[in-house]
Amino acid sequence: MNFFLTDIAKRTKQPRENGLTMMMDKGLSLNQAREFVSMNSSHTDIIKLGFGTSAISPDVEEKIKFYQDSGLKVYLGGTMFEAFIIRGMYKDYKDLLRKWNIKMCEVSDGSMEMDHDNKCEYISDLSKEFLVVSEVGSKDENKDLPTNLWINLMQKELKAGSWKVIAEAREGGNVGVFGSGGKVKSDLIDEIIKNVPSDKILWEAPNKSQQVWFIKLLGPNVNLGNIAWDEVIPLETLRIGLRGDTFFDYLSR
């Protein structure tokens, strides 16, 4: 805060375990990354290099090092993990993480079919060396998982060694825990948080209306991801009650 105001929602302090904001880097240049960090590092915890961008973005190793040196966790999007797995290149994937000195990784099966026991084996193996997040839910808008399956998969992946489980929504916010048009599947989410600790879930919520919904449900320290680089500060104002949607939520009078 640049000045004092009463009745501001209390945020967890960095480095934090909950209240996380994950920014989705979809191909920022090194200079853009530097500009982003100069403005947003105090409001950002994790950088995901989205889908396959790390394979073709210039200066990606230098950018990863810069993010990490700035105190941010960095990982390659789950699609990149799947791209290696479907080609039978799991060892190569781990070698790449080591080469680029990446300490965090994502295990997902949103694009390809994968036996869940095998997925949990990947989580268990990778968690011996890396901080693992795993994603539950399909990127296919026509594939709707039953509620009990969402819960079961999340519980098993946390038990296998995931630090957080990610609730799929894609960068458009129109699959997984959201329906067409980005509508929240509130009954599904209510059942999930009854059975899985909310601080162990990172909710992908790229759209403002979705961010508002989660903040009102779970408070200012809900974990939110797939946030665009230019939406991190606007999200923080939502969290603390300095934007119209949450303006009255924390006032004591």
Image: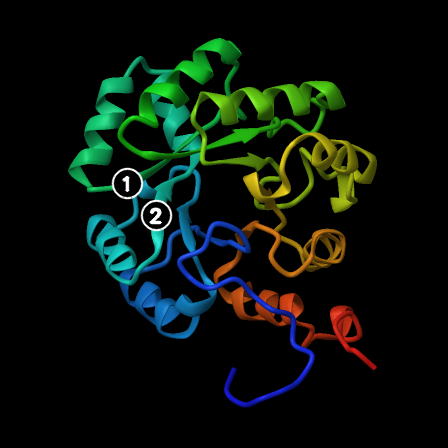
Label 1, secondary structure: give it. loop
- List x then y, in percent, for residue 3: 54, 90
- List x then y, in percent, for residue 11: 56, 66
Circle 1 is placed at which residue position? 103
Q: Are marks 1 and 2 in contact (CB under 8 Å)?
A: yes
Label 2, secondary structure: give it. strand
User: Outermost residue, left direction?
Assistant: 99
Q: Nearer the viewer, mark 1 or mark 2?
A: 1
Residue 226: mark: none
Q: Nearer the viewer, residue 154 or 146?
A: 154
Q: Residues within 10 Å of mark 2 (few under 14, many from 20)?
A: many
Q: Nearer the viewer, residue 42 or 31?
A: 42
- Disc nearer the start of the sequence (1/2): 2
> How many numbered marks does the figure carry?
2
- List x then y, in percent, for residue 32: 34, 66
Q: Amino acid at mark 2?
A: Val
What residue is drawn where x is 52% and y is 62%?
Answer: 12
Place residue 239 in its image quadrant: bottom right
Q: Is residue 5 left or right of residue 252?
A: left
Circle 2 is placed at which residue position? 74
What residue is drawn where x is 70% and y is 29%?
Answer: 195
What residue is drawn where x is 69% and y is 22%?
Answer: 143
Q: Amino acid at mark 1?
A: Lys
- List x then y, in percent, for residue 65: 22, 54
Q: Nearer the viewer, residue 124 or 79?
A: 124
Q: Is residue 239 left or right of residue 2?
A: right
Q: CA distance from mark 1 to mark 2?
A: 7 Å
Task: Please determine whether, in this image, residue 134 is positioned above or below residue 178.
Answer: above
Task: Please determine whether, in this image, residue 169 is positioned above or below residue 158.
Answer: below
